[in-house]
């Protein structure tokens, strides 16, 4: 893994916190995850696999209209009903099976309680989710972070693209390597991970596009060492990385704990 973007003597954590601050000033709080309950977060995380959020959102609307965003109704639904609702998200048969598998597993292993799932040691909960058919690392971490407020950074394609183009990881680094880098250099705070991930997705969609990046106007463009000999104006007098992130982590965002499971 290469880490070449930060100027000499500046730790990667300092680079990351500066990026976070710049993006937050530019785009503002993102208010992720866009859902009403933890169940809706989980279903959205499954449905957004290999498709756009717009397609996943259409499937969520159909689930809501069918009453399947409530646990009792979802448990009673046939696989055909679920397939019909999630069709707009693509791979509807596979995703319907994943939803059914998750619901049946939660009932069997945790008596249907998300609180029980998320109260476990983080690595235990993650290992259990990854053992389920249809749940990969990105989906499992999205469930843990956004539904359970468990601090696993969702190191998705947008995140990896931004980090790689700014020299903090290699373009060859996959999900696990990018996540290790972020966990090593960021405080383990679910609110920070939530907001930072959402901000990286936003800058990825607007500027750091896969085929043709649009660096002009990007708030992170001044920090691209490979495009300029200018050095970013790091503020050495600022508080520590942990304290600076803690300032942003005081907000109570996301799904409320009292929402129906």
Image: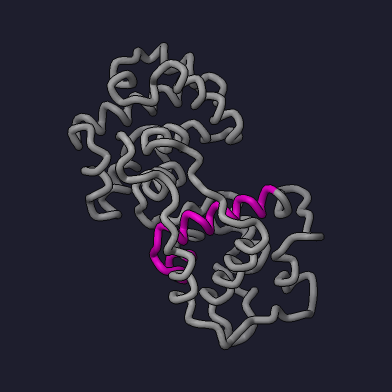
Quadrant of the rendered image containing residue 108: top left
| Point 24% across, 43% down: residue | 115
Left or right placement of residue 213 versus residue 83 in this view: right
Q: Main SS type for the magenta part? A: helix
| Position of the N terminus by quadrant | bottom right
Residue 172 pos. (x, y %) = 59, 58
Percent position of residue 36, x then y? 43, 36
Q: Is residue 150 above or below residue 147?
A: below
Q: Which residue shows up at 37% across the image and 34% down it? A: 39
Q: Position of residue 229 (x, y in %)?
A: 79, 79
Please identify the quarter of the rendering in which residue 258 is found: top left
Which image quarter is the C terminus in? top left
Name the image quarter holding residue 232.
bottom right
Give the vertical position of 124 relative to 94 (above or below).
below
The residue located at (40%, 58%) in the rendering is 190
The image's colouring method is one colour
Q: In the depicted view, which residue is nearer to us: 238 or 47?
A: 238
Vertical arrangement, residue 136 with respect to residue 197, above or below = above
Q: Nearer the viewer, residue 70 or 224?
A: 70
Residue 202 lies in the magenta stretch: yes
Residue 142 locus on image (x, y percent):
44, 45
User: Quick check: is 37 in the magenta stretch?
Assistant: no
Which residue occupies 76% across, 54% down?
Answer: 213
Magenta segment: 181-205
Labels in figure, total: 0
**196 to 12, vertically: above or below:** above
């Amino acid at each position: 893994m290469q880490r070449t973007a930060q100027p000499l003597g500046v730790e990667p954590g300092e680079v990351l916190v500066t990026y976070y601050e710049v993006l937050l000033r530019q785009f503002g709080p993102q208010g992720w995850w866009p859902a009403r309950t933890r169940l809706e977060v989980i279903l959205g995380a499954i449905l957004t696999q290999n498709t756009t959020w717009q397609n996943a959102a259409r499937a969520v609307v159909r689930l809501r209209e069918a009453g399947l965003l409530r646990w009792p109704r979802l448990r009673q639904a046939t696989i055909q009903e679920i397939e019909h609702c999630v069709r707009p998200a693509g791979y509807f048969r596979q995703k319907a099976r994943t939803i059914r598998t998750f619901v049946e597993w939660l009932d069997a292993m945790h008596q249907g309680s998300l609180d029980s799932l998320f109260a476990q040691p983080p690595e235990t909960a993650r290992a259990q989710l990854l053992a389920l058919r249809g749940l990969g690392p990105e989906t499992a971490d999205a469930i843990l972070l956004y539904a359970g407020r468990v601090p696993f950074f969702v190191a998705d394609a947008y995140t990896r693209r931004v980090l790689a183009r700014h020299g903090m990881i290699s373009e060859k680094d996959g999900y696990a390597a990018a996540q290790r880098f972020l966990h090593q250099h960021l405080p383990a705070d679910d609110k920070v991970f939530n907001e930072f991930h959402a901000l990286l997705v936003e800058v990825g969609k607007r500027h750091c596009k896969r085929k043709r990046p649009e660096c002009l106007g990007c708030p992170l463009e001044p920090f691209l060492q490979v495009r300029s000999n200018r050095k970013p104006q790091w503020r050495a007098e600022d508080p520590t990385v942990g304290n600076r992130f803690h300032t942003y982590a005081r907000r109570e965002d996301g799904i409320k704990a009292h929402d129906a499971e």
